[in-house]
Amino acid sequence: SQTIHQWPATLVQPVGSPLSLECTVEGTSNPNLYWYRQAAGRGLQLLFYSVGIGQISSEVPQNLSASRPQDRQFILSSKKLLLSDSGFYLCAWSEGVPYGYTFGSGTRLTVV
Amino acid sequence: GENVEQHPSTLSVQEGDSAVIKCTYSDSASNYFPWYKQELGKGPQLIIDIRSNVGEKKDQRIAVTLNKTAKHFSLHITETQPEDSAVYFCAARTPRYSSASKIIFGSGTRLSIRP
């Protein structure tokens, strides 16, 4: 069966520090991968998606970037965090044409 | 592009009563409508979904209805229980995003079950 792993679960980082969040999927090949952000009490904002290694599409301009160095690995990064980057970050995967996403457990990022 | 609106944003019902959450979508080409439940501090979990060739689907206490003409779909929870308290998201998938079909989410409904 397929599983998705996301870490760390919580992170507190100072303003201006770098960020690296990792997501991996097991039990499937060539998944579509997604990064979402959820601000406190708000909905799900799609940040990036990827249909294959090295293929990244950005939904909104921002202080973050994404990379997919391996088929089942998706990384969210920032060179310098801003206070506004705080939120709950969710990784998700789907098959080619998604009949539903499977979400990871999320990373709660607090920038101080 | 697709836009999904969800109402209400908060809903409080007495335990044992029914809860209804409604969504509308804008793209008539959308053909798949999942519903997610998100408990505090966790990722959303798919609880039920419906495809555009079906008008209603049930799974125990949960049901979803779809009106393609009006571009409305709804989640119905009967005999609510305390564990139903969570944030619920509706979503729609349009096939027009052919290179990477994406699912667009509503803004969420915070459901609280009063004992």
Image (tube, helix red, strand yellow):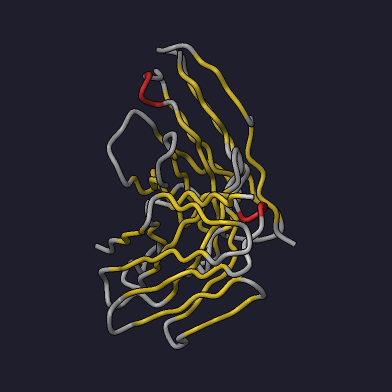
With A35 as the anchor, is B14 left or right in this view? right
Q: Nearer the viewer, residue A44 or B77?
A: B77
Give me the residue at 64% from left, 31% from top: A9
Q: Position of residue A99 (x, y in %)?
A: 52, 70
Report the side of A97 relative to B27 (left or right): right
Quadrant in the picture for residue B94: bottom left
Marks counted in the figure total 0
Residue in front for this viewpoint, A29 or B47 = B47
Seen from the viewer's position, the closer of residues B71 and B81 is B81
* Left or right: residue A84 compared with residue A76: left
What residue do we see at 60% from left, 38% from top?
B41
Q: Work out which quarter of the rendered image holds the N terminus of chain B and state it.
A: bottom left
Seen in the picture, residue A40 relative to A58 is either above or below; the reply is above
Q: Position of residue A37 (x, y in %)?
A: 44, 40
- Up-down: is B32 above or below B44? below
Name the residue at 59% across, 40% down: B40
* Percent x, y of residue A73: 59, 44
The answer, for residue A71, to whether it is visible in the render is no
Q: Nearer the viewer, residue A63 or A104?
A: A104
Question: Residue B73, how many percent across, how many down?
Answer: 39, 73
Q: Residue most toward the right?
A: A1
- Image height check: is B10 above or below B92? above
Tell me if A81 is positioned left or right of A110 in this view: left
Residue B102 seen in render: yes
Q: Is residue A56 above or below residue B102?
A: above
The residue lying at 40 percent from left, 41 percent from top is A42
